[in-house]
Image: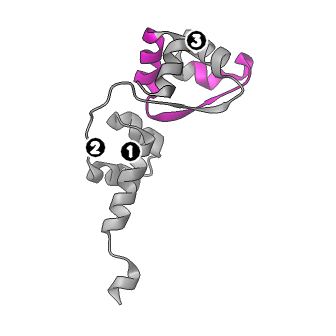
Amino acid sequence: MNRTETILVERLGLERAERLAAIAGGTTVSVPAQLANAARLRAFLGDDLATLVVLHFGGLGRVYVPRMNRGSRVDAKVVLRLSRKGWSASRIARRLGCSERTVHKKRAQIRASQPRKDDLT
């Protein structure tokens, strides 16, 4: 378990940390300082989990939620197809069960493999 996972488990408990990772793992979540401003977070995570997240991490602004179960392989072609449809890295990550970082890496691999305009002249 990495440091961020450990902090989540210590503060939220294992079951809730795993639930948070299942919902938002691999993405960065905006966490307001006060529960009164957490309507979007409550709709996304549910009332009880959003309340705990705000209580423990409120005021930090944004919190990266790691994936707690690893091993999914992501196809760069799927990332490219979804990116061309205008999907955000966060939405692609949730759809493919990976992290935003993985999506950004796949996008970089795609860009690196495409010929540059300088190479065509």
Q: Quadrant of the N terminus?
A: top left
Q: Could you say where residue 9 lies in the image, as x and y percent from the top left?
A: 49, 15
Residue 18 as seen in the image, left or right of residue 78 = right
- Whole-angstrom CA distance, mark 2 to mark 3, is 31 Å
Sequence-earlier tag: 1 or 3:
3
Residue at 29% in and 49% down: 78
Snapshot quadrant of residue 14: top left
Count every numbered label the image shows and give the total.
3
Q: Residue furthest bottom?
A: 121
Residue type, label 2: Val
Circle 1 or circle 3, nearest the eye? 1
Q: Could you say where residue 118 lies in the image, as x and y percent from the top left?
A: 40, 84
Q: Magenta segment range?
A: 14-42
* Residue 47 numbered tag: 3
User: Residue tagged by mark 2?
Assistant: 74
Residue type, label 1: Thr
Sequence-earlier tag: 1 or 2:
2
Residue 39 falls within the magenta-colored stretch: yes
Q: Could you say where residue 53 lies in the image, as x and y percent from the top left?
A: 60, 18
Q: Nearer the viewer, residue 70 or 83?
A: 70
Is there a contact, CB below 8 Å, between mark 2 and mark 3? no
- Whole-angstrom CA distance, mark 1 to mark 3, is 29 Å
* Residue 102 numbered tag: 1
10 Å neighbourhood of mark 1: few (<14), some, or many (≥20)?
some
SS for dot 1: helix
Residue 31 falls within the magenta-colored stretch: yes
Residue type, label 3: Asp
Residue 56 as seen in the image, left or right of residue 111 = right
Q: Main secondary structure of the magenta part?
A: helix
Is there a contact, CB below 8 Å, between mark 1 and mark 3? no
